[in-house]
Amino acid sequence: MSATARPALPRLLPGPVTLRWLVLGLVVLAWEAAPRLGWVPPVILAPPSAALLAGIADFGTFARALAFTLGEIAVALLIAYGLGGVVGLVVGATPLLRAALLPLLSSVYAVPFIVIYPVLTAWLGIGPASKVWFAGFYGFFPVVLATAAGVQLVDQRLVLMARANGASRTQMAIEVIIPAALPAVVSGLRIGGALTTIGVVVAEMLAATDGIGFLITQNRTMFRTPEVYFGILLVLALAGTLDTIIGRIERRASRWRPQPEGIGHG
Amino acid sequence: MTETRTTMEALRMDGAQLMAAGQDLAHRHSNAAAAEIEVKALTHRYAGAEGPVLALQDVSLSVPSGHFVGLVGPSGCGKSSLLMMLAGLVTPSEGSISIMGRPVLGPAPERVGVVFQEASLLPWRTALDNVAFPLKLRGVPRAEREARAAELLALVGLAGFERRYPHELSGGMKQRVAIARGFCQDPPVLLMDEPFAALDEQTRMTLGDELLRIWDRQRKTVVFVTHSLTEAVYLCDEVVVLSARPGRVLERIAIDLPRPRTWEVMASAAFGELRERIWRLIRTTP
């Protein structure tokens, strides 16, 4: 209904959604065609159909590895979001800490953390603990930085209004600071979520005993290319799902904001 | 044991009598138009970029109960700072403020309501929730505070807009919501910080009339900061003219135009004279 208000596009051009699926379809098609037509050796690039078949054939192994990885991601997210959110809130709301720590945190964020992973495995072993801590801290920084930035951006007039009405510290945080900072925080959660997922999988690839990343590396060393690609597809699906969930939360959290289309929906 | 109880009862009796006496006293006071806001020898400095800035100097002011008082002055004269001090949001460097006989040491929403500019609405809350916000902070149950907020929205002419978010309202409507919020706790004193500054002339006039209509019913003590002299003369019983920084009270001008006022009063000679008098004061001071 709102589409009628928009200027009509020339009929020849597809809509953005159609175009997106078209591009995606072409990529998959090229991927399927390239190894089948002999443009690329199948050992390097397995066609998606072969990857899917391999995955179905070895479903049990993949499902177990996926569950293991999901567990690690869940705990790592707890560290990234929980710790990151609290630290971001405190640092963002305290001028002294903000001035002292924010530059430090953003420079540390720029360090490629993967270099410390071998050290972590020496401390924590190659079990899930090293993955969880590595990925948790990998995702921790964007969450801290985004939360601190969001808290800083809170409209001071709202803070003044709440103070004039006698808001306590806790009420100020719950009623004003957190809702105002939420859009910025959620974008931090998004980046943090992606980094946490990457962190777990990459760590599993480097040194592990289980999980999707481990499975990918293992299959690669055995030249089982379709299985490698199925593992990659699973990781992509995992990251995509997490991103979609956070996107949903983001939209829910900003329902009060002016919508780009259909202003008169209220 | 019995003895203690009787002593306790006697004490309670004394308390009750004292309360009654206090109320009586308060009554007599209000009959004599007691000063509800008392500002004594207020001086305020703050740390600016180039050393300390003297914002207000020796400002004394008393506002009788139920009066509508305007604060005007050149920009940067500290009229908004003065209002923030009355609201308990800024602590003055020297001097004292008391409202209803008690010193102002911090925000006291049950005594003092503040109406800010329209931008002070919480954008993620509906009109109803914004009006009810002060009550929510005080822990008033949802049903009760929503009933009160709905009543106030109706009072400011926004019945039917309860579920709208601020971005779905016009500037004038948002300001009505902010006014309703100021009235929400029914405080005897209402402080208004350039509430209509962001509005166009027409909306501004309409809202001024609305404000007078509501005030006429409730007779709260109002301190109204504005930079519009027309608005000040039209709305107020008295206009306090502050000098350029450091802000001092230049003159307190009684606006003895009859009430209720309508827009015709603006065309009167008396209105023009009062407005001009204030303008001269502001213009000629350094």
Image: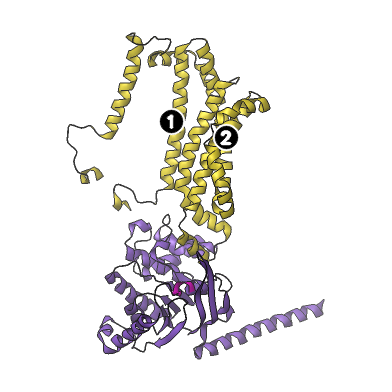
Chain colours: A yellow, B purple
* Vertical position of residue B207 compared to residue A107: above or below: below
In the image, the segment drawn in magenta is B76-81
Would you place residue B20 above or below residue A27 in this image?
A: below
Instruction: Work out whether mark 1 precedes mark 2 in sequence or the reverse, and give the earlier one.
Output: 2
Q: How many marks?
A: 2
Residue carrying label 1: A240
> Looking at the image, do the residues carrying marks 1 and 2 touch, with CB atoms under 8 Å apart?
no
Q: Which of the two residues, A232 or B130, is positioned nearer the viewer here?
A: A232
Please state which amino acid type lies under the numbered disc 2: Gly
In the image, residue A61 lies at what x, y percent?
53, 17
Element under disc 1: helix
The nearer-to-camera label among 1 and 2 is: 2
* Label 1 environment density (alpha carbons within 10 Å; few <14, some 14–19, many ≥20): few
Measured as percent of width and height from the top left, residue A50 is found at: 40, 13
Dividing the image into 4 quarters, which one contains the N terminus of chain B?
bottom right
Residue assigned mark 2? A136
Q: Is residue A56 magenta?
A: no
Q: Is residue B184 left or right of residue A84?
A: left
| In the foreground, B71 or A49 | B71
Disc 2 on helix, strand or loop? helix
Image x and y of residue A245, in percent: 45, 36
Q: Which chain letter goes with mark 2? A: A
Circle 1 chain: A
Left or right, A230 with reference to B199: right
Q: Residues within 10 Å of mark 2 (few under 14, many from 20)?
A: many
Q: Is residue B99 left or right of residue A254?
A: right
| Quarter of the figure with residue B67 | bottom left
Identified by mark 1, the residue type is Gly
